Amino acid sequence: MSFRSSITIIASPRPRVGKTLLARLLADFHRHEGRAVATFDLNAGDKTLEHFLPEQTTTASIRDINGQIALFDRLVADENTTKVVDLGHESFESFFAVTHQIGFVEEALSRSIGVAILFTMTPDKTSVEAYRSLRARFSHATLAPVHNEMLGPAQHRDKYPLASGSPVVRIPVLAPGLRRYIETPPFSFADAQLAETAGIPVSAHVEIQRWLRRIYLEFRELDLRILLADLRSSIRFGS
Amino acid sequence: MAKPAVILVGADKGGVGKTTVARTLIDYFGAHQTPTRAFDTESPRGTLKRFHPDLTEVVNVTAVADQMKIFDTLGSADAKVTVIDVRAGLLSSTLQALTDIGFLESAKKGQITFAVFHILGPSIASLEEIAETARVMGDANYFLVKNFINNTTFFDWDPATYNSYFKRIKGAEEITIPKLNEMAYEQVEVASVPFVSFVGNKGVKNEAANYSFVLRGYVRHWLGNVWGEYDRVKLVDLVAPKMESNVRQAAG
């Protein structure tokens, strides 16, 4: 058995650590690989993701049961789409509480959908404890810590225990002068044509592409790890 | 010959969720491979029968003919456990009837395992009921069930008063049924299937159904907690003592 599709949840209990950028990068990576992508925005009142991925993005809320049904039933739905969830910091606790209670990861696995959680590492105690709690609660999901080098060079590896053979996903620094190009919609990492119409200088475009290739390499490795986790579990449980 | 067990589920008030508790019991014994039958006393149209039509018979527990149907068959029925969902207000009179026919006497002698699930209502009136029931019950297995399934603000009576009633029954145990999300509960009602079938995404005839995964998740979580309570009071040991289950394992 191998996964038909995957759900990646981008999470951190801290605001402004680059979750939405990571969601965009990941969604565009999957589009670049030729997969259908759906993104779910759980940031309250923030439409950033929708501005960059208007066709892919669904605004979601899990505050009431109807919102939960709309989100989770869609996530595990039997469709050949890779899904990315951009989890706002204010929804972090309630999202994982519901996820755990309804047995979301197990349900997804039973439908051959792999679940990964990308967790941006920051040195604060809240994040460290949140990470440990996710590790304890979601042993069937691939939990991958993310080192966003734009937040600083320190990885805080000592604070974040890793599963064996699961390296950190690294988001390298992008030169400050180039940030404004990728942070002004419309912009898509998957659409080189758009760069031209948006009037991005060729030198900047080349630099962004170089940066992007390093990130895509990290994502490919992550994909392999999700597959490997699946293989491991099928060996363990005997198929 | 295995000792038959009778579980009475009752309350003096309607709308406190007796049938819901009876349904979780039937699911619980089903999960423990303990053959179970049920009697629904909401004649002529029983709610319990709607959810468990194959196991349930609708009876009038105060009529002699129906009492015979229930109690004279205890030894001969395939089912080891008999769950009786007693209609609102009939708990005391049912217990009185059981005393009259000598049933409680056999329970005392240990020929029959007998347990009462007394579902508590939100008012003090149902506490008076405890006192009344205590008089006839003696030392049967008595469970006081606080049912929070549909309510958030439920038990607002004084704990001291409650405890004074609670202590009148020797060896009484408390069971708490936690709250279940309203929409999840409603959807199970609409589907008219046992909780276990809802969780397993199965319809009335065991066909594949299409319930919301979120609602199934909530029901599974809730049912797990309810069963956790039944495990805590060792309900399976009560109706099917260890010795026998070992024998069954050896035979099987």
Image (cartoon, helix red, strand yellow):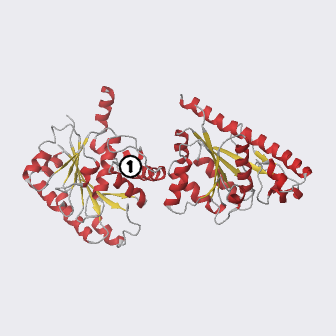
Q: Secondary structure at mark 1?
A: helix
Horizontal side of B162 relative to A92 (left or right) equals left
Amino acid type indicated by mark 1: Trp
Quadrant housing residue A14: bottom right
From where the camera sits, is residue A153 visible?
A: no
Please state which of residues B87 and A34 is positioned toward the viewer in this rendering: A34
Quadrant housing residue B175: bottom left
Label 1 marks which chain's residue?
B
Please state which of residues B86 and A197 is positioned toward the viewer in this rendering: A197
Farthest residue, direction top: B251
Please state which of residues A69 and A151 is positioned toward the viewer in this rendering: A69
Q: Is residue A236 above or below residue B188?
A: above
Residue at 52% x, 44% y: name it.
A107
Q: Position of residue B90 (x, y in %)?
A: 17, 61
Q: Position of residue A1 (x, y in %)?
A: 57, 31
Image quarter hosting the C terminus of chain B:
top left
